[in-house]
Amino acid sequence: MTKSFVSVFLVLFLSVLRAAPLTHDLGQGLRYHRAHALPADLPSPDTPHASALVLDLRTATGDIAAATALSAWLKFHSAPRAPVFVLVNSATSSALLAALCRREHSAGLVVLAPAAPGFTPDIALAVPPETDRNAYDALEAGTPLDALLNSPVDKPRNDEAKLARDRQPDRAPAVPETPPPADPSAPPVPGPPPLLDAVLQRAVHLHRTLLALKKI
């Protein structure tokens, strides 16, 4: 087996393993499209572009030719009434970031990213890079999109035992008490905060605000 054959085989094998773009309906006329490698992963030209879109380019790869294709795609698809919210981070290809910096297609284009030196998006968020990457990977691993966009609501407990105590406190069945902590004076240790995709969440909130203001 020659080295050239091995090289061709590896290229074909890696191209098969390359993750396909992820698409989701975010509701109210907003779509989500995650691209891993440009220009191949850009939304199809046949895709309707009369609605808003989140184009997730975080960690996306692409060379100068891909950056040119991205610029052309954004110029054609982004418009004030059909905005494109582009998500990037420090792991996005430098060629793609450079194309976005030029802002040749600013109408309807909003670039969002975690704050980082060397790149100035339209909206910079104070999100640690590792948190942004964990949220990005969580969707790739199958975490529901709603879980990454919405904080869990801590609802008061209204089970049968509690209702019985409220209605007839003298006849309510005894409920085993929760054992006290080792140190009663110590406050309970809070669990880790829920993993949220703050960059994507901001894009969704911005879209909903534009809708409320009847801008789109």
Image (cartoon, grey):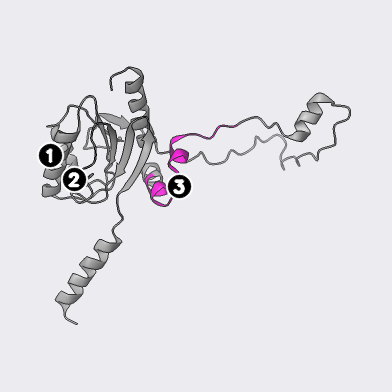
Check residue 96 in the rendering and tell me which mark sits there, or answer none.
none
Is 163 placed left or right of 56 in the picture?
right
Question: Which residue is depicted at the point 78% across and 34% down?
Answer: 161
Task: Name the spot of residue 12 as percent of width and height, x first.
Answer: 22, 67
Which amino acid, mark 2?
Ser
Could you tell me if residue 108 is visible in this image?
yes
Whichever of labels 3 and 2 marks the residue nearer the N terminus, that label is: 2
Question: Which residue is depicted at the point 81% across and 38% down?
Answer: 175
Q: Quadrant of the N terminus?
A: bottom left
Whichever of labels 1 and 2 marks the residue nearer the N terminus, that label is: 1
- Assess whether residue 174 is covered by the magenta stretch: no
Inter-mark Cα distance, 3 to 2: 28 Å
Residue position marked by numbered label 2 in the rendering: 94
Which amino acid, mark 1?
Ala
The image quarter containing residue 216 is top left
Q: Secondary structure at mark 3?
A: loop
Q: Magenta segment range? A: 136-154
Q: Nearer the viewer, residue 107 or 190?
A: 107
Q: Secondary structure at mark 1?
A: helix
Is 106 placed left or right of 131 in the picture?
left
Check residue 143 in the rendering and tell me which mark sits there, or answer none.
3
Query: Can you say whether 17 is above or below 202 in the image?
Result: below
Residue position marked by numbered label 1 in the rendering: 72
